[in-house]
């Protein structure tokens, strides 16, 4: 069966172009594969630090930028080779929520503009009344009172309110999948939960798959069913979130989870594990495993060739030579049962 | 001396009372009234050759005296000012139109077109305008106000293209442009409905600066004698004054009035565009 | 009382914006003992950064310190002349800035930015002594010696923050204020920088005020923590007391809303909207969102009470 | 990295030259009618005192410059002449070559532009720095509107006013020229004093207007920079006010200020040319003015070309200085 949204061996290089000589290329994403079937609708988390390529991935999956190599497919069709009709269907079925609530609204218009435009563009309503109806339902769906929200200018609403209007916007088109790029990182802690809750509701009640991109493993654990850990554009570890978070196998994932400051004074950070060398000057282009020069278990092979994904058990795969005895996972890390 | 900017309370400039903009607009409005109402009030005959005894000093009868051809200087001034303003406005309009077009195209669409426009603009910026304009002007036979404006316009597009392109580049990356794409909005509509409205303040401020530059370039060419020979413009008034040695012979009333008028134009336009920039920045800082 | 390094009493800082007066810090009081790590936590707009900057007297117009006292030992910093205050900065109280990304002068080498501090406090040392001090500092913050001659744009985020930590401890100050030092860093780098800061702070026996919004970081780093809401200090106590038995309803909801690795798929936010500082709600600023709100909560302003030694709360529930 | 930067800047320099030459070549050919014949005709009309057979003269010139050959061939020969610094002959004072006429005028212009622009830039930048510093007395703030007005007065209009008051009425300075016509240019104190005495008025008119522009540019730049985080940290570090202003504020404003100078160089030179015309100062500007008066065609082309090249060269030199001022420029890692 064709998958809803799929990336096959996608690599994206950013050469700072311009001028007559293109300078060094920086690797944003390297040989990344992902498949989201869409039924059952699942929530997949992409976790990684800044500079790991998460945002580049979202822009690739949305078709805003095209991959240097590899393809992105929507229902088996290549994004770059779609007809106008296919592209409109893709645009309607794959929606997104962005990170910065302050940047997402054109200061020139009231916030209604962001809701009325999709209705007009995708002809979702036949009359003004029906359009109004759609908008109000969508706003109530994310816990906002329409009379308090509509007709206002963006700067009159708080960050939390604006982000919820963004979720409502995505809701309007009732897409099959929503790519949420760090939806709560710029929102206060108290409002964070309400937004995550509305994402969970979309998945459970409306059957919308969600790709939750974040640097915060705790919210990833809370929201998602399976997770992919990214480091400098490469997949380090992937699988069921319960296994990956509670029993991390890749050294980098272990370092990540060990560094999370738990809000519990009794759960102090493990004694300072200084075997991990601090991150040095900005990274260059090394061939082998990207984590090699910081990893305490580094072996020669780690510097030569990038490690493939090894399947350690049913739904848990890790790209590290420590597990080279395990069978190689099939390349498409997908979200349905392994 | 008008009150110093210090009068603006504390470091926060109240948006409504931007002193620079108000003073600038005041000067510009007076100039426009003088330029476009003046000619209606004075009859053109006073400005014709031989209308009066030449080289008279300013008197009650001739507030600004007469020049070597016996024209009343005040009458000539009232007819010359609108002409110079017209050249500036036409050249400014053409310049801003090309600038917005090129700026939007090269700012929004990356790909091959952008470097061409960018490098082209930079190269033309480094070339002193007077050099090119001289070569063009010497080869144009009959020069009147409109051709003069078009000659100037041939280089007036440089500043607008550069400014608008820079702004478009930054606006293109904004979040709301990505959201608009997700809402199914196509490139062209995106440019017009999402980017252009936010560009308007920059376009206005840039237009004022371009008009000011155009007038400067015009009087520059006219000082070299390349201006319209048979029409009154402020630049040509100065040229003829110098041509007949008015400075050495102390006939200050031939060249002083046009100079004062030109300086007023520049000060008015400069205050207006600087005031506009301040408003754009404070509004930007507040919106972010 | 001699163990108190810093006493802040009823500090008020208002911003006179064209849209009206913003009471960023409205009567903040707390105590800092020698070697103690105090956390000031609160959501954006709660006034924690304003409080930190006010202690260093770095509030710029349109902000103004309206009143209150900041006692460093027996000196009230608010009364010092600007020249005397300049001498206090980084000699007795130092600051680790929030945005390490652009807190370093981009056109100056790292070593010059460190020696600047020594020269500014008329420490007349020879070039060699200064160079040696720089090397010693860089070693303390685990940075290679070559970093000294590098420019800020050649360093990573974590390395820049370590330089800021080195600068903060150059003159061995009594108090270090860290204003959300790691908010822009990854969680891995954040832990490494915080643990370096802890080690250095303990060696110096300096006190630290850590300003931030990350409750997890507070739980891991500080000894006692103050919770701020709408410019007021609503709760203060040891980190165990505040996290295990929070008194103020806001603190309770805040801790309950924190995602943790135990509960999966369970979200609990704080209803209502963050308060507007231009016209804050009357009485107790939290009353519109407070589940245990009583009728007079919206009229009477609660005051900070010491319900047990070192344990403060500002809520009508605890007034006699 | 630094080499990469130099190559890019040098290629820009070459591009400017190519473009300038092409413009100079194309524009006259765009105009209707035959350029040479038109020039000769107008020259005679303006009473150049020759009575000659225009068509024969035009024929000779056309052959000399191969105007009868296809355009691209003309273009190549045009380049070929340029590379041999053969700008052609001045029609008015034949046999003097354009190259000689222009190169003899260049030092005067460079002297005038160089000194006055650098002086105006230095004074303006310092003044702008002071104006932006908050602890500066309010009285100095009153300067701002004056600077604004000064910066919006074109150089050569100011020159006219200066001549009238200082040269005609008060007779302190000479009204025109660069030195006593009688004096033979010997390299002794008297000549230098005389040259300086003549250069005062032209330089002043450039400097006064220039200071206004640079002061405002610097003030705008610095007010932006003073809001930066590294300034707040510098204050927190307890550094002295002047140290922060100079090493943290102005040091960072220097690069954008220089870029502004580079951008306005073309504008400044345009102004200086007109000042030379007003003072009959024997630089490139006045040479251009004389050529324009009598439509001495090839001199016009030569002057314009050389003007563009000298500015492009100045910009190249400035570009090469940038990395020394701001280390980030040559460092193109990202």
Image (cartoon, rainbow, N blue to C red):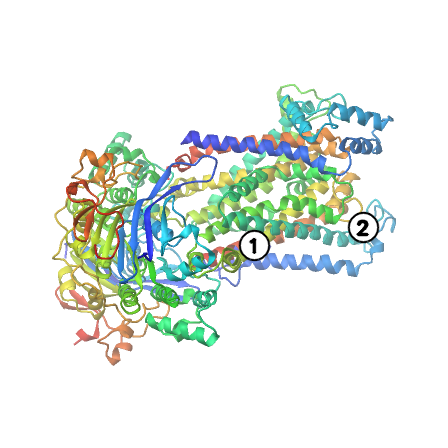
Q: Are marks 2 and 1 on the same chain?
A: yes
Residue C106 coordinates in the image, percent (x, y): 37, 41
What's the distance in space between the residues labelled 2 and 1, CA to CA? 42 Å
- Judged from the image, the secondary structure of the residue bearing numbered disc 1 is helix
Letter of the chain that mark 2 sits on in the rendering:
B
Number of marks present in the image shown: 2
Residue C290 coordinates in the image, percent (x, y): 25, 73
The residue indicated by pointer 2 is: B65
**In the figure, residue C160 lies in which quadrant?**
top left
Residue B6 in view here: no
- Identify the mark nearer the N-term, 2 or 1: 2
Q: Residue at x 58, y 41 (%)?
A: D210
- Judged from the image, the secondary structure of the residue bearing numbered disc 2 is loop
Answer with left or right where residue D25 lies relative to residue A71: right
Quarter in which the N terminus of chain B is drawn: bottom right
The residue indicated by pointer 1 is: B203
**Which residue of the protein is positioned furthest toward the bottom in this rendering?**
C295
């Amino acid at each position: 069966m064709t998958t809803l949204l799929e990336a096959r061996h996608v690599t994206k290089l950013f050469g700072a172009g311009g001028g007559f000589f293109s300078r060094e290329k920086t690797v944003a994403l390297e040989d990344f594969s992902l498949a989201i079937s869409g039924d059952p609708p699942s929530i997949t988390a992409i976790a990684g630090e800044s500079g790991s390529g998460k945002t580049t991935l979202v822009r690739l999956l949305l078709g805003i930028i095209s991959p240097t190599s590899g393809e992105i497919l929507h229902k088996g069709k290549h994004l770059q080779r779609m007809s106008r009709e296919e592209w409109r269907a893709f645009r309607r079925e794959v929606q997104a929520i962005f990170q910065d609530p302050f940047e997402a609204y054109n200061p020139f218009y009231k916030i209604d503009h962001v809701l009325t435009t999709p209705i007009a563009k995708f002809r979702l309503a036949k009359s003004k009344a029906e359009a109004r109806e759609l908008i109000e339902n969508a706003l109530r769906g994310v816990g906002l009172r329409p009379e308090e929200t509509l007709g206002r200018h963006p700067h009159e609403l708080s960050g939390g309110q604006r982000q919820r209007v963004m979720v409502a916007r995505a809701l309007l088109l009732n897409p099959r999948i929503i790519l949420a790029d760090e939806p709560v990182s710029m929102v206060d802690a108290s409002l964070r939960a309400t937004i995550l809750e509305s994402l969970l509701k979309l998945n459970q009640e409306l059957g919308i798959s969600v790709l939750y991109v974040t640097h915060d493993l705790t919210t990833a654990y809370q929201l998602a069913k399976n997770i992919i850990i990214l480091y400098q554009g490469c997949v380090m570890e992937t699988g069921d979130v319960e296994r990956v978070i509670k029993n991390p196998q890749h050294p980098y994932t272990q370092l990540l989870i060990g560094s999370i400051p738990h809000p519990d004074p009794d759960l102090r950070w493990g004694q300072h594990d200084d075997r991990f060398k601090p991150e040095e000057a900005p990274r260059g282009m090394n061939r082998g495993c990207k984590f090699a020069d910081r990893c305490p278990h580094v072996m020669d092979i780690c510097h030569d060739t990038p490690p493939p994904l090894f399947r350690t058990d049913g739904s848990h795969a890790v790209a590290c030579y420590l597990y080279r005895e395990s069978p190689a996972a099939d390349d498409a890390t997908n979200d349905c049962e392994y | 001396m008008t009150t110093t900017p210090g009068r603006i309370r504390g470091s926060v400039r109240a948006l409504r009372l931007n002193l620079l903009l108000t003073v600038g607009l005041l000067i510009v409005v007076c100039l426009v009234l003088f330029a476009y109402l003046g000619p209606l009030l004075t009859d053109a005959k006073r400005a014709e050759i031989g209308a009066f005894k030449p080289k008279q000093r300013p008197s009650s009868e001739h507030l600004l005296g007469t020049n070597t051809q016996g024209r009343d200087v005040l009458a000539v001034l009232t007819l010359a000012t609108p002409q110079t303003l017209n050249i500036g406005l036409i050249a400014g309009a053409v310049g801003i139109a090309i600038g917005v077009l090129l700026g939007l195209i090269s700012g929004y669409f990356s790909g091959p077109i952008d470097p061409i426009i960018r490098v082209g603009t930079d190269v033309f910026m480094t070339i002193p305008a007077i050099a090119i304009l001289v070569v063009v002007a010497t080869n144009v036979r009959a020069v009147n106000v409109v051709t003069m404006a078009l000659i100037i316009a041939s280089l007036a597009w440089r500043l607008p293209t550069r400014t608008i392109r820079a702004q478009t580049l930054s606006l293109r990356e904004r979040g709301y442009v990505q959201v608009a794409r997700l809402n199914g909005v196509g490139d062209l509509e995106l440019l017009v409905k999402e980017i252009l409205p936010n560009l308007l303040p920059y376009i206005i401020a840039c237009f004022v600066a371009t008009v000011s530059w155009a007038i400067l370039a015009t009087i520059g060419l006219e000082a070299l004698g390349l201006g319209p020979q048979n029409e009154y413009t402020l630049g040509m008034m100065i040229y003829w004054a110098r041509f007949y040695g008015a400075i050495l012979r102390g006939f200050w009333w031939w060249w002083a009035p046009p100079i004062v008028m030109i300086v007023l134009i520049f000060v008015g336009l400069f205050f207006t565009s600087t005031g506009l920039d301040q408003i754009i920045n404070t509004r930007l800082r507040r919106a972010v | 009382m001699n163990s108190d390094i810093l006493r802040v009493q009823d500090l008020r800082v208002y911003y006179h914006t064209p849209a009206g007066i913003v009471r960023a810090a409205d009567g903040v009081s707390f105590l800092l003992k020698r070697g103690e790590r105090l956390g000031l936590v609160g959501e954006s707009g709660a006034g924690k950064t304003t409080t930190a900057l006010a202690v260093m007297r770095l509030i710029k117009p349109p902000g103004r310190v309206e009143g209150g006292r900041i006692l460093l030992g027996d000196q009230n910093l608010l009364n010092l002349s600007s020249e005397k205050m300049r001498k206090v900065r980084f000699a007795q109280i130092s600051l680790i800035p929030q945005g390490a990304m652009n807190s370093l002068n981009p056109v100056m080498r790292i070593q010059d930015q460190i020696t600047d501090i020594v020269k500014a406090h008329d420490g007349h040392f020879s070039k060699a002594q200064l160079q040696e001090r720089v090397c010693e500092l860089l070693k303390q913050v685990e940075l290679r010696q070559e970093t000294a001659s590098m420019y800020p744009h050649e360093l990573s985020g974590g390395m820049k923050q370590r330089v800021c930590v080195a600068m903060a401890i150059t003159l061995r100050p009594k108090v270090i204020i860290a204003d959300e030092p790691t908010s822009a860093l990854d969680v891995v780098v954040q832990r490494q920088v915080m643990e370096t800061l802890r080690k250095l702070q303990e060696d110096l026996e300096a006190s630290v005020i850590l300003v931030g919004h990350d409750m997890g970081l507070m739980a891991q780093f500080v000894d006692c923590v103050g919770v701020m809401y709408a410019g007021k200090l609503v709760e203060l106590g040891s980190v165990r007391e505040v996290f295990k038995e929070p008194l103020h309803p806001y603190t309770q909801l805040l801790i309950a809303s924190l995602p943790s690795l135990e509960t999966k798929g369970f979200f609990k936010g704080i209803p209502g909207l963050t308060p507007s500082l231009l016209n804050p709600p009357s009485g107790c600023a939290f009353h519109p969102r407070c589940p245990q709100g009583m009728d007079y909560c919206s009229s009477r302003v609660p005051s900070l009470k010491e319900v047990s030694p070192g344990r403060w709360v500002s809520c009508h529930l605890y007034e006699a | 990295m630094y080499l990469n930067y130099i190559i890019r800047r040098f290629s820009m320099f070459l591009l400017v030259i190519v473009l300038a030459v092409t413009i100079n070549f194309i524009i006259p050919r765009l105009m209707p009618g035959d350029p040479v014949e038109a020039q000769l005709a107008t020259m005679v009309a303006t009473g150049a005192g020759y009575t000659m057979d225009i068509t024969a003269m035009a024929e000779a010139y056309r052959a000399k410059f191969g105007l009868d050959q296809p355009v691209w061939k003309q273009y190549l020969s045009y380049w070929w002449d340029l590379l041999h610094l053969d700008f052609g002959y001045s029609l008015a004072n034949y046999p003097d070559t354009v190259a000689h006429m222009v190169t003899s005028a260049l030092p005067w212009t460079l002297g005038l532009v160089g000194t006055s622009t650098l002086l105006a830039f230095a004074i303006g930048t310092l003044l702008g720095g002071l104006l932006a510093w908050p602890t500066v007395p309010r009285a100095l703030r009153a300067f701002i509107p004056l600077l604004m007005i000064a910066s919006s007065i074109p150089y050569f209009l100011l020159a006219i006013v200066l001549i009238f008051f200082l040269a005609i009425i008060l007779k302190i300075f000479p009204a025109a020229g660069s030195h006593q016509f009688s004096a033979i240019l010997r390299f002794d104190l008297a000549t230098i004093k005389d040259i300086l005495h003549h250069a005062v008025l032209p330089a002043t008119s450039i400097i006064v207007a220039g200071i206004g522009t640079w002061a405002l540019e610097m003030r705008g730049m610095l007010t932006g920079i003073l809001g930066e985080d590294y300034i707040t940290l510098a204050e927190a570090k307890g550094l002295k006010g002047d140290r922060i202003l100079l090493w943290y504020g102005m040091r960072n404003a220097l690069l954008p200020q220089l870029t502004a100078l580079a951008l306005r160089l073309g504008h400044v030179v345009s102004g200086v040319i007109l000042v030379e015309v007003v003072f009959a100062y024997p630089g490139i500007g006045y040479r251009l003015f004389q050529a324009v008066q009598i439509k001495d065609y090839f001199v016009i082309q030569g002057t314009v070309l050389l003007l563009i090249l000298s500015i492009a060269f100045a910009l190249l030199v400035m570009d090469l200085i940038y990395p020394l001022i701001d280390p980030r420029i040559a460092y193109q890692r990202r």
